[in-house]
Image (cartoon, rainbow, N blue to C red):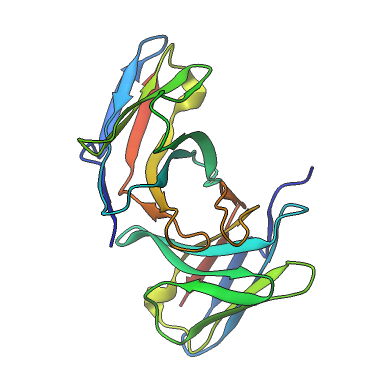
């Protein structure tokens, strides 16, 4: 079974631009979570989507948004990029459903650099 | 809110020896999961081991085992017969079961280096 895939793997943007990252979960997984990893803040939870609905949200500004499609693929968008948004963005999928929590499996990440 | 603390930023061990990484956490929940993930230089986050809080038996996966002390809120990882490929950043993570859905809280990480 194929793992979690993320595209693109690397991205360079300039301040003020917006960016969209994509994540395809493991087949059969309906929950997709996003995390931001930076040297200063470590790994922080952004949000989780399940059945096309945002179910959990971390403490990030509204510039960070996401969505999930009917095939469980997810995208996250960051608008008006700031230098501090430079990070590794990790996507994870799980078999978690309503009332049942399962292990999250991670993709290889998208390295975003904001200049 | 839950917190996870890894007090050892860096550790090193000789190949074939045993090493233990420490993790403590704080939560008011009674049912939860604890995980150890490793992140090698490739940055791919890989699941090492998982422990359910309601299970008293410590989880084991080949050379990896945990010492789960629920009352002390401690969750350490023991790596036996260390191999060069174990060199990675290791993250301890918590996930509550009371909150619907997935939401991992990570520790700061421990950089483990296995020396030949």
Residue at 32 percent of width and 19 percent of height: B19
Residue at 71 percent of width and 47 percent of height: A3
Against B60, residue A83 (above or below) is below
Indicate left or right for B74 with B115 as reference.
Answer: left
Q: Residue B67, how many percent across, how many down?
A: 33, 25
Counting labels gives 0
Against A70, residue A103 (above or below) is above
Indicate left or right for A96 with A39 as reference.
Answer: right
Q: Residue B91, how many percent across, how many down?
A: 39, 42
Residue at 53 percent of width and 65 percent of height: A34
Decide which of B80, A11 is in the foreground and name it. Answer: B80
Q: Residue A102, how many percent across, how many down?
A: 57, 48
Against A51, residue B47 (above or below) is above
Decide which of A4, A85 is in the foreground and name it. Answer: A4
Against A65, residue A94 (above or below) is above
Which quarter of the picture shows residue B54? top left
Which quarter of the picture shows residue B7? top left
Position of the N terminus of chain A by quadrant: top right
Residue at 40 percent of width and 39 percent of height: B89
């Amino acid at each position: 079974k194929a793992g979690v895939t993320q595209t693109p793997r690397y991205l360079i943007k300039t301040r003020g631009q917006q960016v969209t990252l994509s994540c395809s979960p493991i087949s059969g997984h309906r929950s997709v979570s996003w995390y931001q990893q930076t040297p200063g803040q470590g790994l922080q939870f952004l949000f989780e989507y399940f059945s096309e609905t945002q179910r959990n949200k971390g403490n990030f500004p509204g510039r960070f948004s996401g969505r999930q499609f009917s095939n469980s693929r997810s995208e996250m968008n960051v608008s008006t990029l700031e230098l501090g948004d430079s990070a590794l963005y990790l996507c994870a999928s799980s078999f978690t459903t309503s009332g049942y929590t399962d292990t999250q499996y991670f993709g290889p990440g998208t390295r975003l650099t904001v200049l | 809110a839950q917190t996870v603390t890894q007090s050892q930023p860096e550790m090193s061990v000789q190949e074939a020896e045993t090493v233990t990484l420490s993790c403590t956490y704080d939560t008011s929940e009674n049912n939860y999961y604890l995980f150890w993930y490793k992140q090698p230089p490739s940055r791919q986050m890989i699941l090492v081991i998982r422990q359910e809080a309601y299970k008293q038996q410590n989880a084991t996966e080949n050379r990896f085992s945990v010492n789960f002390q629920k009352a002390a809120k401690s969750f350490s990882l023991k790596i036996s017969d260390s191999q060069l490929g174990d060199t990675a950043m290791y993250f301890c993570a918590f996930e509550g079961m009371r909150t619907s859905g997935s939401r991992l809280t990570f520790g700061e990480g421990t950089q483990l280096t296995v020396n030949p």
